[in-house]
Amino acid sequence: MFIIFVIGTAGSGKSLLTSAFAEWLRLAKQDVAIVSLDPGAVRL
């Protein structure tokens, strides 16, 4: 199991990177879980 944290300033593309990377991993038949640690975020 690997854990990857994506951090950065607001508007820097963290969600876009996370979504694209998760899709790439899923296409490679990998299990993916995304957890948002931003208490103000409603959706990823």
Image: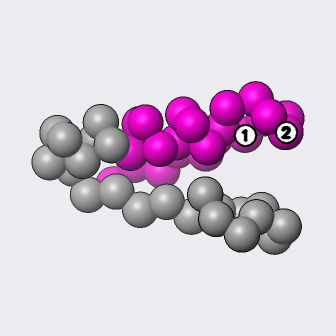
Establish if 37 lies above or below 26: below
Q: Position of residue 19 (x, y in %)?
A: 47, 44
Q: Picture quarter containing residue 31?
A: bottom left
Q: Position of residue 38 (x, y in %)?
A: 77, 62
Residue 43, quarter of the rendered image: bottom right
Front-most of 33 and 41? 41
Is mark 2 in CB contact (under 8 Å) with mark 1? no
Question: Residue 10 has which mark?
Answer: 2
Q: What's the CA distance linking mark 2 and mark 1?
A: 9 Å
Magenta stretch: residue 2 in it? yes
Above or below 35: residue 17: above
Residue at point 49% right, 60% down?
A: 34
Q: Please give left or right for residue 6 compared with residue 32 in the image.
A: right
Is residue 15 magenta-colored?
A: yes
Q: Which residue is mark 1?
A: 7
Stretch in magenta: 1-22
At 43% across and 36% down in the image, what residue appears? Answer: 20
At horizontal 14% and vertical 48% (from top left) the residue drawn is 29
Judged by depth in the image, the label closer to the viewer, 2 or 1, is 2
Looking at the image, residue 15 sits to the left or right of residue 4; the answer is: right
Quarter of the figure with the C terminus: bottom right
In the rendered structure, which amino acid carries the disc numbered 2? Ala
Is 2 placed left or right of 25 in the picture? right
Question: What's the residue type where badge 1 is placed?
Answer: Ile
Q: For mark 1, give the secondary structure.
A: loop
**How would you rate the neighbour count of disc 1 (Cα within 10 Å): few for under 14, some for 14-19, many for 20 or more?**
few
